[in-house]
Amino acid sequence: MVVDTALRDDEVDRLFRALADATRRDILRRTLAGEASVSQLAAAYAMSFAAVQKHVAVLEGAGLVTKEPRGRERVVRGDPEAVARARALLDRYEQIWRDRIRRLDTLLIHD
Amino acid sequence: MVVDTALRDDEVDRLFRALADATRRDILRRTLAGEASVSQLAAAYAMSFAAVQKHVAVLEGAGLVTKEPRGRERVVRGDPEAVARARALLDRYEQIWRDRIRRLDTLLIHD
DNA sequence: ATAACCTACAACCAAATGGTTGTAGATACT
DNA sequence: AGTATCTACAACCATTTGGTTGTAGGTTAT
């Protein structure tokens, strides 16, 4: 069951960009461990509510998190599939390297 | 052989930040597949030599690439270990999610 | 109804990013 | 020696980013 991961460049950009901030990574961690409202998240950081709101928006834009209305709150949940997509991309880079090594080995063995 | 991945926040920032650009990802791909000089890399993109030089510097700062002098050239090589470090970080996030699911399952089964 | 709470969104600001051009230093080639 | 090539680095510019405050709208509680 390999999900087709044909991501456009700008989607990958957003994915890694969203991960490139410690606050956002922490929000992702929390929301993967269990859902949380934006205000609950905001209470955990030494910055304004609006700032946390923006971080959540960045994560949402990257697909790493979903936001669902519940009463007056917005419940944020981390999406493990998006994390898996990012990981799959890195797997490909490692594979590129392994392919190169395999080719080099082949040359050394068969000359 | 699990490499100790005690990365500081700003190191992780740089790692994902470096990956959040299509040109840099392409440079990483090329240099993982085989070493290349900066000018060889620059020839592949529709931008100035200096711009490519900067991208390589960002990748180098993130540890994703090494630059070694060879004559008048600088040979750039992708570092598969750095890619593995990034991947290991994402593995942790997936693990956090799995731990949560496991706890939920336990509750459902044992109540 | 009124107050308290949660969110959305705009406007603003400083700093970082991604690009440019230009200048200069090493190294290699003829 | 002189020229071409490769790299380093500074200065500059437009845009994006990560933060702020302020205002307004919807929801819950008293």
Image (cartoon, coloured by chain):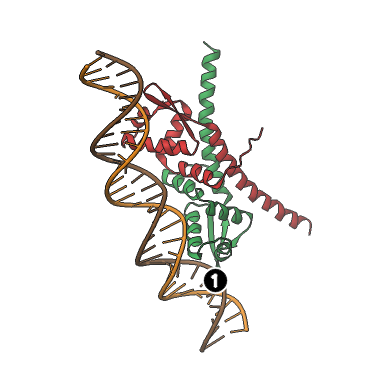
Chain colours: A red, B green, C orange, D brown
Percent position of residue B7, x then y: 46, 43
Number of dots carrying numbers: 1
Residue lying furthest right in this view? Answer: A110
| Closer-to-camera residue (B94/A79) | A79
Amino acid beneath label 1: Arg
Image coordinates of residue D17 in percent, x first then y, are 40, 46
Is residue C3 shown above or below B50?
above
Q: Position of residue B14 (x, y in %)?
A: 45, 49
Residue B110 falls left or right of residue C20: right
Residue B78 visible, this orientation: no
| Whether residue B61 can be seen here | yes
Is A74 placed left or right of B35 in the picture? left
Q: Residues within 10 Å of mark 1 (few under 14, many from 20)?
A: few
Rendered view: B107 above or below A73: above
Q: Chain of mark 1?
A: B
Residue assigned mark 1: B72
* Picture quadrant where residue D5 is located: bottom right
Quick one: quadrant of the C terminus of chain A? bottom right
* Residue that appears at 54% across and 18% down: B105
Residue placed most toward the observer, B71 or A60: A60
| Residue that appears at 47% across and 33% down | A65
Image quadrant where one finds the N terminus of chain A: top right
Q: Is residue C12 above or below residue C8?
A: below
* Callout 1 secondary element: loop
Q: Position of residue B9 (x, y in %)?
A: 42, 43
